[in-house]
Amino acid sequence: DMKVTQMPRYLIKRMGENVLLECGQDMSHETMYWYRQDPGLGLQLIYISYDVDSNSEGDIPKGYRVSRKKREHFSLILDSAKTNQTSVYFCASSLRDNYAEQFFGPGTRLTVL
Amino acid sequence: QQQVRQSPQSLTVWEGETAILNCSYENSAFDYFPWYQQFPGEGPALLISILSVSNKKEDGRFTIFFNKREKKLSLHIADSQPGDSATYFCAASPPSSFSKLVFGQGTSLSVVP
């Protein structure tokens, strides 16, 4: 069963707290992504990972960092969260040679108070 | 800078009508255009895609029309059904994008019975 999972689904944090969002996939995809989705802005790429320990900044990396120690897991970390990081975060994965077909997780709704 | 633009932002059609969702882009190097469908509370999923060498792509009730000269494309949903109510994202990719897609801001479609 091809699937991308995200944990947690909902999270409320206070400004200045650290946040860890986790993503897993069972398709052995080499490439994984973190996006954020805000009303009227569509999907914005935060980070992309081409494989274990091979990560690259996306379009809006400021305030975020990532970790990929296993091919099936990709974490997004917010050190000292800010209120403007309130958003819905999506993880996705794809085969290296078919990046146009990205498989998305169900999303994590993060609220930073 | 919004490289991929979608219009309208929201669209309401009656059941059975054809819904037309528009997309335009700025970068003439873009050569692959996937459309993603997103239902509330879920992540986006690939619906249909087209390469810039084609001017039309059909898949059941969904058809993409592509005009390379004008840098425009549209998604036509024939015989719209209430189950088609979702947000639709147009995306684009250039040949050397390092696995990145650029997403538009989305069109929210409501199909009224």
Image (spheres, helix red, strand yellow):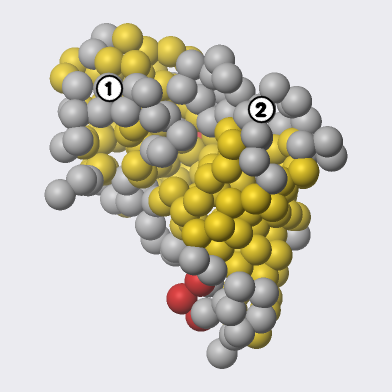
Report which residue position mark 2 lands on. B30
| Residue positioned 39% across, 29% down in the render | A98
A94 vs B19, left or right, is: left
Q: Give, as a three-letter code, the residue at label 2.
A: Phe
Horizontal arrangement in the rendering, residue B54 relative to residue A5 (left or right): right
The local secondary structure at tag 2 comes to: loop
* Residue A13, percent from left and from top: 36, 41
User: Toward the viewer: A67 or B112?
Assistant: B112
Image coords of residue B68 (percent x, y): 77, 37
Query: Mark 1: which amino acid?
Result: Glu
Residue at point 55% right, 63% down?
A: B62
Which quarter of the picture shows residue A43? Answer: top right
- Same-subunit check for callouts 2 and 1: no
| Nearer the observer, A42 or A20 | A42
Q: Residue placed at 77% from the left, 43% from the top? A: B67
Mark number displayed over residue B25: none
Q: Chain of mark 2?
A: B
Q: Is residue B78 left or right of residue A34?
A: right
* Chain of the residue on which disc 1 is drawn: A
**Which x, y percent locates residue A109?**
39, 49
For disc 1, the marked residue is A30
**Relative to A32, does residue A36 appear above or below in the rendering?**
below
For the C terminus of chain B, the image quarter is: bottom right
What residue is shown at x 19% (from left), y 16% (from top)?
Answer: A69
Label 1 sits on a secondary structure element that is loop
Q: Residue furthest right?
A: B70
Q: Residues within 10 Å of mark 2 (few under 14, many from 20)?
A: many
Expressed as whole percent of the image width and height from the top left, the position of residue B19 reads 67, 70
- The residue lying furthest to the top in this view is A53
Q: Nearer the viewer, residue B52 or A71?
A: B52
The quadrant the N terminus of chain B occupies is top right
